[in-house]
Amino acid sequence: MPTDAPLHGIRILEVSALGPAAITMPLIDLGAEVIKVEPRAGDYIREMTWPIVEGVSLMHLHLNRGKRSVVMDLRTEEDVATFKELATACDVVVEAGRPGVLARRGVGYDDLKSLKPDIVFCTISGYGMTGPYKDLPAHGVAFDTWAGIVTPQVNEDGFSYLPEHASMGIHAGPLFGALGIMAAVLRAKLTGEGSYFEIAQSDAAAAMDWYRSETWRAYERPESEVTGNKSDDYERRDPGTAGMIHGVRYQVYEAADGRFVLFMASEQSLWKNFCGAVERTDLFDRWPGSKYADHAVGNLELRAELRDIFRTRTATEWIDFGVEKNFPVAPVNSPKTIAADPQFQDRFHWYSVDQLGAEQLGSPLKFIGEQMPVPTHAPTVGQHTEEVLADILGWDAARIEQSRARGGLGGGPGA
């Protein structure tokens, strides 16, 4: 690992299960060291979801890449003592699961702060530490349905179902949490003061979708105070993309090859560029639109004209033409096809099967002129127990066996 990686020297002790383990993954990609504490049976994320890659879930391979796994049973005094010793050698402790579990084991924030005043303690959970849902079991999609991001559908047999959608809370929650960790670590380095903070994945989903919820809230005020925009004659539209269903200059169109492109000429200057580029200045003369934010809502005559125009070139030809003539048009990809997109190929790095057990995307962050560390393969349960204790605490083989003999580190009956 390069010693000049942005987060080199930051060490995190993580107790995690399932999706919330994602909280440290972006930090690992930037050079942080993460030690994942697991029970003897391990985090069952290895068996969850699909696909299963050579017996192990892709979710585990991705979310726990780069981590070292240590087995502990925090119901034992032996491992509680070891956990405390490890925590004092770390900058951050992450409780990724139900809040308060570590406190009940004697290794919560107050327990650790007395040993290390500048410790950063982060709890990431489903619904957070307060509120009527705080003890409600949940999985990741629940945070999106709670936040109003997913609209249930009904099939032809009359059964309701969850439509395909991009998960929000399970990804946004960890990113907010990682941001909080770095803010707290920075303060600890500057002031010597530790922090205790939490992030709920449901909260993160709602925060990411702030535009729609804040719009509905704004519309509770009288229309004398809150209107639509000037180009719509100040008529209110539904929030977010729902208000674009009847858009024309901001809409998806089918190209000659059957693929779709997104046309976005809602600024008058860009609409003029487009009309000139396709040699249809008559469209601009007839419907010049407003200076900004004009989607030509409901103009079916113009929509038919644009439908026919966009069928004259392939999707790739439209993108190239947009670059050449300076008008906004974008590919409409799917999760299956995006990897073939040339912009994606230019921007993203794939880790190989040999490196991480499955092809995985690298970090979207780019430090100019720097090479970020390559994370290691996601660990097996307890794979690094001896290594971590030797590297960080200086334990030798005899000391490790003594701990196991006292029931620690996965020792005891049935070990």
Image (cartoon, helix red, strand yellow):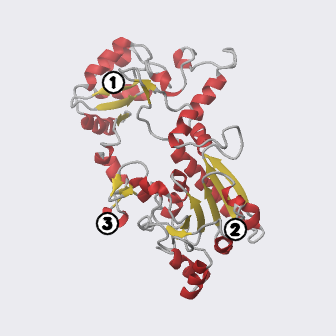
For marks 1 and 2, the one nearer the N-term is: 2
Q: Position of residue 137 (x, y in %)?
A: 59, 43
> Taking 180 as reference, is 318 above or below it?
above
> Taking 267 as reference, is 393 above or below it?
below
Helix or strand or loop: what does disc 2 sit on? helix
Can you tell which mark lies on residue 189?
Answer: 2
Residue neighbourhood size for the residue with mark 3, other residues' Cα within 10 Å, grouped as few (<14), some (14–19), many (≥20): few
**What residue sits right under mark 1 in the picture?**
275
> Is 199 displayed left or right of 35 in the figure?
right
Which corner quadrant of the image does residue 215 belong to? top right
Between 136 and 408, the one lying in front of the other is: 408
Q: Which residue is drawn at the image coordinates 52% and 32% (left, top)? A: 149
**What residue sits right under mark 3 in the picture?**
354
Question: Which is more foreground, mark 3 or mark 1?
Answer: 3
Asked whether residue 349 is in view, the answer is no
Asked whether residue 187 is in view, the answer is yes
Q: Position of residue 279 (x, y in %)?
A: 27, 24
For marks 3 and 2, the one nearer the N-term is: 2
Q: Position of residue 63 (x, y in %)?
A: 47, 57
> Taking 392 as reference, is 325 above or below it?
above
* Cα–Cα gap, marks 3 and 1: 50 Å
Between 235 and 260, the one lying in front of the other is: 260
> Taking 221 as reference, is 11 above or below it?
below
Between 246 and 145, the one lying in front of the other is: 145
> Is 132 displayed left or right of 327 in the figure?
right
